[in-house]
Image (cartoon, coloured by chain):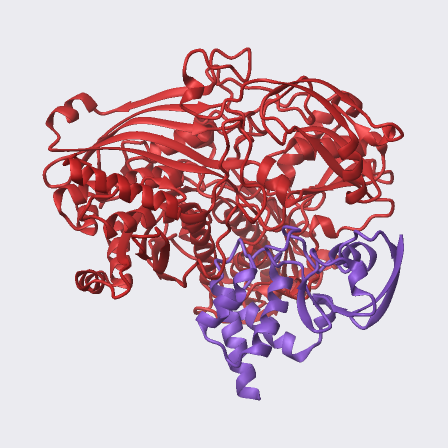
Chain colours: A purple, B red
Amino acid sequence: MITVTLTVNGQEETHSIEARETLADFLRERCNLTGTHLGCEHGACGACTVTINGLPARSCLTLAVMCEDRAVQTVEGTRGDPEMDLIRKHFHEAHGLQCGYCTPGMLLAARDILRRHKAPGEATIRKELSGHLCRCTGYVGIVEAIRRAGAELSDKS
Amino acid sequence: METTGDSWIGARVLRKEDERHLLGAGQFVGDVRMPGLRDIAFVRSPMAHAKLKGVTKPEGHEASVFTYEDLGPMKVLRTSPDMPTFHSAHYPALATDRVRFAGQPIAMCLASNRARAEDIADLVQVDLEELPAVVDVVDAMKPGTIKLHEDWPDNAYIHNTIDAGDMEAVAKIAAIKVKRRFKMNRQPSVSLECHAVLAYWDFRTGQLVVYFSTQGPHVMRIGIAEALGLQEYQVRVIAPDVGGGFGGKNRLMPEELAVAALAYKLKTPVRWLEDRREHLIASPHARDHYYELTAYADKDGMLLGVDGDVYVDAGAYPMWPTAAFMETSMSARNLPGPYQARNLRARTFTVATNKAPMGPYRGVGRPGACFAIERLMDEIAHELGIEPVELRRRNLVSSFPYETIGGMKLDTGDYHASLNAAADLIDLPAIRARQAKGELDGRRIGLGFAMYTEQSGHGTGEWVKRRGRIIPGYETATTRMGADGTVELLVGIQSHGQGMETTFAQIAAHELGLDPSKINVRHGDTSISPFGFGTFGSRSIVMGGGAAARSSRTLGEKLKKIGAHLLQCAAEETHLKDGQVHGPNGSVSIAEVARAANVRPDLLPQGIDPVLDVTMTYEPKESAGVFSYSTHGALIAVDPDTGAVELLDYVVAEDCGTMINPLVCDGQVQGGVAQGIGTALYEEIPFDDQGQPLATTFADYLMPGSMEIPNIRLAHIVTPALATEYGVKGMGEGGAIAPPAAIANALTDAFKDIRASFDETPLTPRRVIRALDAAKARVQTGEKP
C-alpha cells in the first residue's frame, strides 16, 4: 500500500492505496466523486475524463499514484464555474444529452475545446470530440451545444 | 419554455432530467454507496462449448468463491414463447454441467473491491472438456451437427413457415426475379453504462433491495422473486439513472440473478458492475440475421412477392422473460415493408449456436428485414433502370388502413409524402447532376434510400399472438396531487434517456392545466411506482403516456367537481387552465382545491371523497399497434481503391403521429440513426471457428464517433394515430432500422455501372472491396448479378 496525496477539486485528499489503483477508482470509491463515469476502462470512450493540472486526462488510464501533488478537477469541481455553467446551459438547450452517462466527460472535453479554439465550427468540434463516445444522441445536440457555447463565449470576450 | 398555443402537447419543453446529469449528480447503480459493499468478479468460460467437470476454489479463498450449488435452490424461470414447437433450455445463473459460449459465467468471487475479486477469479481452476463449437447458423441446422441442447431434435429453437398468397404462380409470371443473400452481423447493444446490479438485504423492511440498471424493474422483480422463492413483496427493484439500454437491459441476465441470490444468501451488500469486455462478450447480443431471398416484380417494377429463408442466430440460451424467437417472426412479417406486394413465403429458423444469447436491440427484427427488402427494391430498380425513388413511389401503400401480406395492420400515414420529403431534403436532382460530373478526388458518390414501418404500442391481442408468458398489453400511471396543488406522476415505465420525466409531465400538465414544473414524474422503483412492464418496443409514449393522460384526466374531473362546489357552479361549466379551475363567474386556484381535497375535508361537497390520487391503466383501442414510418436518405463518398466510405449527408423524413415534445423526438431519431450507422459500417463481433469472440475491446469493436456520424437532418410529417391518446405513435426504435439499408443502397448506387451488390453489414472497407472484386469478375465473365 502506498500513501498518496493529491488535490481534488481544491481539497487535499490523502489515502493509502494499492499502486495499481486508477485515478478513476480513487475519485469514485475513495473521494465518492461519482460524477466521473467509467464507460470502457481502456481509454476509448472518454466518459471518465477529468483534468490534471488543467489538462484533460482519462482517469481510467491514469494511476492515482501518478497524481501525487497534482491538482485534479472532476465535473463536480466545475459547479458554479461561469464558463462551465454556460456550456451546461447550451447542452440543456441543444438537447446535448439523453441518458447522461457520457455527459461529464463531454463537458470537460467541451471546455477544453473552447479554450483552444475561438468560436469553433462544426468540423473542428467533430474532430476535437472524436475521442468521446456517446451512444444516445448521435452527437448532433452535443456538437451544436459546443458551437453555441463557443459563439457566446467569443461574443463575451 | 416555448409552447404551442395553450397546450403542452407538442411543446419543445427543455428536459427536466438534464440538470442532475450536467452537474455530475446523476445516480447510476455504480454511484450507489453502501457501508460494507463488496464487489463481484465472475469466472467465465474460456471455451465456447465444453463439459464443465469441476470448479476448484483457491486455497484460503474458499469462502469468497461461489458456484451454482452455493447460491442455494433456485427455481428455473420459464421463458416465452409458450408454445409446444418452441424448444427452451435453462440458462442458469452460473453454469452447472456444461458451458455453451465463451464468456458464460461459471463462478463468482467476492472481495472488498473489484481488482481483488478479479485476483481471486484468476486463481479459480475450472475443469473443462472441450466439445466442438457450433458457430455458423446454416451449418448448425445440418444433420450430424452436435446439438447444444441434447433434448432438442436439432439446433433450432423453432422453425416456422409463412406462406401467404401464391408464390408458385408469381414465380411463373414475374418479369423480374432478383435473388440475393443478405447478412447482418452480430453485435451487442453497447449502452455506455454497462450492466450493473447492487443488492442487499434490508432488515427493516424485510426486503431484498436490488439496484438494477434495467429497462423494466417491475418485470425483473417478478423474475427475481420467482427464481429465489421469495414473496414478491420481499423484493424491491430500483432502476435509478440508467445509462442507456436500447433493449439490452430488458432481459434478466444470469449474472444479475446470481448477484441477487448472493445478497439474499449473505445478507450483506454486494454488487457487480459489468466491464466493457464482459459487455461485449456476454451481454445480450443482437442482429445476426442471414437471408436467402428472391424478389419477384413485374415489368413496371411492381413488387409481386418475396420468397426465401430467414435464419437468426439466437445464441446458446433463451433469455428471460422472452427468448429471441420474435426476431425471426418479426423479420419475416416485415419483409414486405411499406409495399403492396401480395405474396410472401418465408421459412424461418431461430437457431442455437455457441455464442452469447440473443436479446432485443433497438429495432429488433426490423433492421434485418428492412436491409433485405430495401436492398431488393433497389436491385429491382437497377434491373429495370428505374430511379429507386420512383420504384418506391409505384409500390408504396397509399390508402389506410392497409394490412400487408405480412399481417401488419398499417393504421395511418402518408408514405409518399415521407419519400418525397426525404428526396427533397437531400436534393435528389442535384446529387444526380453531381454524380454525372464525377469527383475530382476519384471517389464515387452514392445515394441510397430506405423506408420502413415501425409497429409500436401493440397491445394484448398482439402479444397473445406471440405467445408470451408475460403479456405487456397495458401500462399504469398514478396521478397524485398534494395539498399545495403540485403533482407526483408515478409511472410503471422506465426512462433511461428518452426524456419521459419531461414528456410525461407535459401530458399531466396538459390534462390538469398546470405548468410542467408543478409535476414530478417518478419511475423505476417497484416501491414507488405502480406496476408496469417498462420501456421497450417503442411502447412507452403510447402505453405509459396514455395511462398518464387517463389518470390525470380523471383527477382533473375531480378537481372540477370540487372547484365547482367552491365556485357555486356546475362541474360541466368549469375548465382547468393556468393552474385555476375556471367557472362562469370566477375561478379558484387548483392549489386551493387541492388543499380542500387533502387537508380540509370540511370544504368538500357531499359525496366527494377526500384525497387526490388516481391510478389508471391504459391500452390503446387497437391492439395491433400504430405504425410510425420514415424514409432515410444517405449520401456517401466511397474510395474504390480502399473501400472507405464517408457519409456526406443523412436525412430522415419521419412520421410518428403527434409529437408530445419535438425536441425529444428529434433526439430519438438522431440517436437511433447513429446506432444504425454503427450497424451499417462499423460494429461487429466476429467469431473464429472455435466460437471465440474476436472483438472484446473498443479497439477492435468500432463505435461510431463524432467524425463518423454526420449532421443528421430531419423532416417531420404528422399524421396522428386514430387509436391512441393525442394521436401519438411510438418512435424510439425507428432511427436504427433503416441506416444499414440506406447506406448499402448508396454503395450499390455508386457502383451501379458494374452492378456491385453490398449485402453484408458492417460494410467495412474489406467487404466493400470484396463486393467490387466480385462485381468486376462478373463483368468479365458476363455473368448476371
Q: Nearer the viewer, residue B754 or A150?
A: B754
Q: Nearer the viewer, residue B686 or B161?
A: B686
Q: Position of residue B732 (x, y in %)?
A: 46, 49
Q: Position of residue B385 (x, y in %)?
A: 13, 47
Is B576 on the left or on the right of B338, as rendered? right
Task: Work out which residue is located at the far bottom of the displayed protein and give it.
Answer: A157
Q: Work out whether A53 lies above or below B48.
A: below
Is A130 on the left or on the right of B722, as rendered? right
Q: Work out whether B66 lies above or below B215.
A: above
For residue B483, say whether it is visible: yes
User: Quadrant where the C terminus of chain B lies?
Assistant: top left
Q: In the figure, residue B505 lies in which quadrant? A: bottom right
Q: Work out whether A75 lies above or below B395.
A: below
Please tell me which residue is depicted at 58% across the width and 67% down the height of the picture: B580
Is B279 on the left or on the right of B595, as rendered? left
Q: Work out whether B102 lies above or below B161.
A: below
For residue B250, say whether it is visible: no
Q: Position of residue B748 (x, y in %)?
A: 26, 47
Please tell me which residue is depicted at 55% across the width and 50% down the height of the picture: B548
Is B325 on the left or on the right of B179, as rendered? right
